[in-house]
Amino acid sequence: MDTYDLITRNAAEVVTDEEVRELAADPAGKRAYVGYEPSGVLHLGHLLTANKLIDLQEAGMEIVVLLADVHAYLNGKGTFEEIRDTAEQMQAQFVAYGLEADQTEFVYGSAFQLEDDYTLDLHELELSTTMNRAQRAMAEIAGDETAKVSHLVYPLMQSLDIEYLDLDLAVGGLDQRKVHMLHREELPDLGYEARPCLHTPIVADLTSGEGKMSSSEGVTISMEDSTEQLEEKVNSAFCPPTREPEGDLENPVLELFEYHVFPRFDEVVVERPEKYGGDLSYESYETLAADLESGELHPADAKGTLATYLDELIAPGRKKLREIRG
RNA sequence: CCGCCCUUAGCUCAGACUGGUAGAGCAGUCGACUGUAGAUCGACUUGCCCCCCGUUCAAAUCGGGGAGGGCGGACCA
């Protein structure tokens, strides 16, 4: 796979393609980042962007993980103390998951976001951004409560972070696109350069297959799930034997294979009793999806296999989490 | 500061006028059917009725106080 394909594989959107191609032409030492509100336990949503970071590391880029403690604070996630605690746990889990510790710079937001220069730039952004615009940028990120002033500051800070962390590429879920677009529009007015952005897809809810809505809490698989819990969750997932279920629904089982399993494993083996045809082996998502579609691969077997591989992905983080918690 | 509205199941809400310790839809759980899930049937669970004080034999409901949330307070319409 060439560098451009590696950098952009499984991306839902790239802004702009020209800029990313330019990056791909000479990726060594270029800096890419994702910002996360600290959370004590990583879930599949975190791991989706982490997979992209691993791709980028493989392409030779430097990775910056922003542990966005100030953002979490502005978003009402607790006291600074609590937030920093969870940030440490988060960092350990990322490393356990597979981010190369010596190729990854973990930065706390509070380490630079409270500096004078940053604050003055922030105020300048406040001066030139309408509340309407800031609020719309946050709509996908904040809860559905009435917006607070802090919620309007939040996306402005994200825009500035991209400059202050000296980045070459901003990565995030598709829910971050409006914030990133805000940054592309506003940074040049402060005399800074807008950076290219890469957005990962939003995976559909496991049990319902509904993907488009920004529903907050469905069933998700996380680092603290036991093997049994994981099997149970995967088994209860929505999985019609097709890539394109009716309506706006997606097939979450296939999505997890595509975005979580195949990027991290070269070969996926489906262990299947002789009665159903014996074992199968896949080297690409496409062939697996095609077999599910044709009926060659039964959803129940796909689920069992998915659970096995997800469990393997999660195991190191789960172990780390247990160590941390004693 | 002034005014109006809201607060009942996980969610959206009904019930309040005409007091008798609570309901619907959705969600969820469990079975049946499918070699998965869903759909479809069948069954089931769920509550400091925002808090305090008062009236009453009896308060989600009436009276008083308080808390939290929402909206409005130039002109035009």
Image (cartoon, coloured by chain):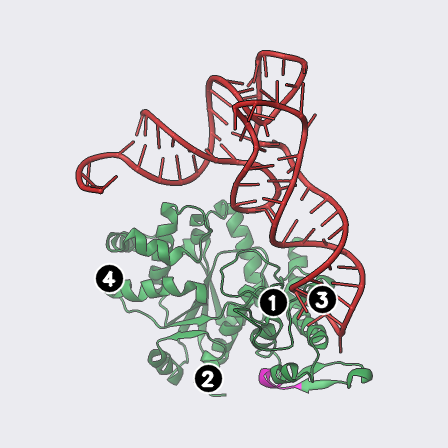
Chain colours: A green, B red
> Where does residue B24 sit, x and y in percent of width and height?
63, 45
Q: CA distance from mark 4 to mark 3?
A: 51 Å
Q: Is residue B75 left or right of residue B41?
A: left
Task: Please state which of residues A25 and B58 is positioned toward the viewer in this rendering.
Answer: B58
Q: Which residue is mark 2?
A: A5
**Within-10-Å neighbours for mark 3: few <14, some 14–19, many 20+:** many
- Is residue A108 in sight in this rendering? yes
Query: CB atoms at circles 4 and 3 under 8 Å apart?
Result: no
- Is residue A157 in sight in this rendering? no
Q: Is label 2 in a helix, a strand or a loop? A: helix
Q: Earlier in the sequence, mark 1 or mark 2?
A: 2
Farthest residue to the right: give it.
Answer: A275
Q: Which residue is mark 4?
A: A190
Q: Which one is closest to the eye, mark 1 or mark 2?
A: 2
> Where does residue A65 sit, x and y in percent of width and height?
47, 64
Q: Which one is closest to the eye, mark 4 or mark 2?
A: 2
What's the residue at 44%, 76% (across, down)? Answer: A61
Quarter-of-image position of residue A309: bottom right
Labelled disc at residue A324: none
Q: Which residue is mark 1?
A: A96
> Where does residue B76 sit, x and y in percent of width and height?
18, 41
Task: Please state which of residues A309 and B44 is positioned toward the viewer in this rendering.
Answer: B44
Residue type at the position of mark 3 = Glu
Residue type at the position of mark 1 = Ala
Q: Earlier in the sequence, mark 1 or mark 4?
A: 1
